[in-house]
Amino acid sequence: MQRDTSIKAYNSIKANGLITGRRMEVYTCLYQFGPLTASQVFLKTGLKTNQSGRFTELKEMGAIREKGRITCPVTKSEAILWDVADTIPVEPKKKSTRKDKKKEVLKLIAEIGKKVQDPEKSQLRNIWHKVNAL
């Protein structure tokens, strides 16, 4: 039996398209049948185990939560028991990519370069070019 807050959250998520694709398949299965382990969700939905990342994404969004650990009826191994959360999900913060970090370092080097004179400026220019080539 679902709580009123879970029902409201699910209806809002569905109506506003806050979760889509494979994430929505996982979320809907947990909403309808949860709490479940990932293997139970895969069995019910026909999703492959390479979709396990959807659980982490949904957790980071606040859409699902870990309810505990149990011996999974499918795998017979200890597994996380997942359930829907009573909150409206938010898109998780984007993780910095290597390209983003490189851009930030190049910007810092350029700022420092404005404050120094030769020969340090020449050395910084060489460092900038080496970082940029990465």
Image (cartoon, grey):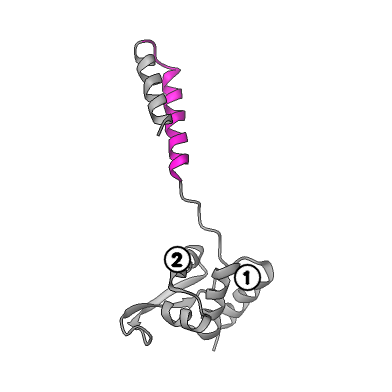
Instruction: Say above or below: 133 vs 58.
Output: above
Which residue is at 43% across, 28% downward?
108
Q: Secondary structure at mark 1?
A: helix
Front residue of this view, candidates 119 and 12: 119
| Mark 2 crowd level (few <14, some 14–19, many ≥20, 10 Å Cα) | few
Which residue is at 34% across, 11% downward?
119
Q: Amino acid at mark 2?
A: Gly
CB-based contact (under 8 Å), mark 2 and mark 1: no
In this figure, which residue is indicated by the disc labeled 2? 53
Query: Looking at the magenta stretch, what is its main secondary structure?
Result: helix
| Quadrant of the rendering where the C terminus is positioned | top left
Give the label on residue 40, or none.
none
Give the label on residue 13, or none.
1
| Mark 1 crowd level (few <14, some 14–19, many ≥20, 10 Å Cα) | some
Image: magenta residue range: 97-118
Q: Is residue 105 magenta?
A: yes
